[in-house]
Image (tube, rainbow, N blue to C red):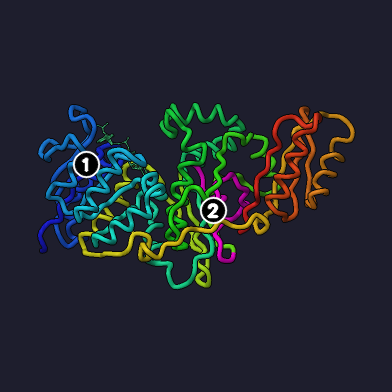
């Protein structure tokens, strides 16, 4: 056997703890797959005195995570998190000193992926991040190495388990977003500060990485409009079902001519399609690989075992000597994505207006929609606090936004209207 691969691990929380556990409990099986032993030669975390669910007493400890870059490890495994601070310092130093890096850190790569990829390439080392997008689902390897014969046309994903859990529970119970969020926090499905999850930011981080892999563009969060799920009501979910759809928070990246549309927003997915059936904290991705057709991936996007599984896959790949460019193409060839032109962004929309129960309000809404050349495919009106719900024919996002701005200003319309695009396919 070749000499052992030496890894140093920074971060011993959910993901890091899981990785150490697999490396010790499944040592022989992993070595057989890797063709060599994998030795953990150093670890770092914030608090040395913390009781850990895994044994680390025999492993040399570093107080300063970034100092691992100067250790004798071949691979630095960064599982601290955050787009700056110790995680960024460690990854930059490790790559600069010619060490391979494995990370689960989507925030870091969404912000600095292009420059880190260039640095990895310059130093001829790997920078791997399978766990960073959709956790245990092997979508990064699939986009980087497998779905390469044809141009990928679109990637659509349920990329945040917390949001999918909340939407699933809202549908099952008819309870509000706020209620379910509190319950999710109690059950450990949502963070104490859920902003990054329910606001859509976490989905955007992952989408930026998938789009980079799929389209050969630099990850760039500035090109991703982001909307979260906090405005979705149980009524929206029930109306969606009546029309034959379900509401999911999707990250969508698709090719429109030579431009790329990227967005994170609640979207209607048609009942009976694979994404509509993804329940609870699961993640899923549909990658439409051009002539090769659509491929559907589903699995656990978070948690100790799924993320450890993805991190170990990266480590074993490096142990085998597999080197491939970070985003599947030379770093210098990654383009700045040109966002889609507004007039090319078309969809049918679900629209919900809460209105005063007075004559003429429906006609007023219809008139404003018609003035923006939006036609209505179907409509439901009901409730004591009256809701008018419509599905439009395909129109531009711009036209809907313009019409809704005018309609929202009416004193017969209560609160902000809700608009949700219907995802094709
Ligand atoms: N959890 C998941 O399911 C999941 C899924 C996919 C990707 N990820 C990504 O994986 C990474 C780790 O997530 P996690 O859930 O494992 O986080 P976590 O449970 O909060 O663990 C973070 C670890 O980093 C350590 N740490 C924090 N600040 C540090 C510092 N300044 N110097 C050294 N160590 C420091 C902590 O030390 P102490 O233990 O001493 O406090 C802890 O061991 C993040 O980038 C996250 O986005 C997580």
Residue pictured at 42% horizontal, 60% vertical: 213
**Would you call the spot at circle 1 few (<14 residues within 10 Å), some (14-19), or many (20 or more)?**
many
**What is the total number of numbered labels drawn onto the structure image?**
2
Q: Image quadrant for the C terminus?
A: bottom right
Q: Would you say 319 lies left or right of 400 here?
A: left
Indicate which label's residue lies in the foreground, 2 or 1.
Answer: 1
Instruction: Looking at the picture, tell me which residue is in the foreground, 151 or 187.
Output: 151
Ligand 1 image-quadrant field: top left
Secondary structure at numbered mark 1: helix
Residue pictured at 30% horizontal, 48% vertical: 103
Q: Which mark is residue 66?
A: 1
Please report whichever mark, 2 or 1, sits nearer to the chain's N-terminal start. Answer: 1
Q: Would you say 341 lies left or right of 49 here?
A: right
| Label 2 sits on residue | 262
Q: Which mark is residue 143?
A: none
Give residue 1's position: percent from left, percent from top: 10, 63
Give residue 318's position: percent from left, percent from top: 23, 59
Magenta stretch bounds: 257-280
Displayed quadrant of residue 393: bottom right
Displayed quadrant of residue 55: top left
Residue pictured at 38% horizontal, 46% vertical: 106
Q: CA distance from mark 2 to mark 1?
A: 33 Å
Residue 413 colored in magenta in the image:
no
Query: On screen, 215 above or below 379?
Result: below
Instruction: Looking at the picture, tell me which residue is in the foreground, 4 or 174.
Output: 4
Residue 260 colored in magenta in the image:
yes
């Amino acid at each position: 056997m070749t000499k052992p691969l030496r890894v140093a691990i920074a971060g011993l929380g959910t993901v890091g703890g899981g990785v150490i556990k697999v490396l010790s409990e499944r040592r022989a099986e992993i070595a057989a797959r890797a063709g060599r032993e994998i030795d953990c030669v150093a670890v770092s975390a914030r608090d040395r005195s913390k009781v850990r669910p895994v044994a680390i007493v025999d492993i040399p400890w570093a107080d300063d995570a970034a100092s691992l870059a100067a250790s004798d490890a071949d691979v630095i495994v960064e599982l601290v998190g955050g787009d700056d601070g110790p995680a960024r310092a460690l990854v930059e130093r490790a790559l600069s000193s010619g060490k391979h890096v494995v990370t689960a850190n989507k925030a870091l790569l969404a912000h600095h992926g292009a420059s880190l990829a260039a640095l990895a390439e310059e130093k001829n080392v790997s920078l791997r991040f399978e766990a960073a997008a959709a956790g245990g689902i092997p979508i990064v390897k699939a986009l980087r190495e497998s779905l390469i014969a044809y141009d990928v046309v679109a990637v659509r994903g349920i990329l945040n388990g917390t949001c999918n859990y909340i939407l699933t529970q809202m549908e099952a119970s008819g309870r509000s977003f706020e209620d379910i969020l509190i319950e999710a926090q109690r059950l450990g499905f949502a963070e104490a500060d859920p902003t990054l999850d329910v606001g859509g930011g976490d989905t955007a981080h992952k989408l930026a990485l998938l789009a980079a892999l799929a389209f050969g563009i630099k990850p760039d969060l500035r090109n991703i409009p982001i909307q979260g799920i906090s405005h979705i009501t149980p009524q929206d979910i029930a109306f969606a079902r009546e029309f034959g759809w379900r509401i999911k928070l999707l990250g969508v990246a698709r090719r429109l001519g030579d431009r790329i549309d990227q967005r994170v927003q609640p979207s209607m997915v048609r009942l009976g399609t694979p994404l509509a059936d993804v329940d609870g904290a699961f993640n899923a991705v549909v990658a439409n690989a051009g002539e090769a057709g659509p491929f559907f991936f589903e699995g656990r996007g978070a948690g100790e075992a799924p993320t450890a599984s993805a991190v170990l896959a990266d480590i074993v790949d490096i142990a085998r000597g597999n080197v491939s460019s970070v985003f599947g193409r030379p770093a210098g060839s990654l383009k700045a994505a040109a966002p889609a032109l507004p007039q090319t962004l078309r969809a049918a929309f679900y629209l919900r207006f809460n209105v005063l129960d007075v004559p003429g309000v429906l006609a007023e809404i219809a008139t404003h929609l018609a003035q923006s050349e939006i036609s209505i495919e179907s409509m439901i009106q009901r409730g004591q606090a009256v809701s008018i719900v419509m599905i439009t024919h395909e129109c531009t996002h711009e036209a809907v936004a313009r019409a809704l701005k005018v309609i929202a200003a009416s004193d017969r319309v209560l609160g902000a209207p809700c608009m949700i695009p219907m995802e094709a396919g």
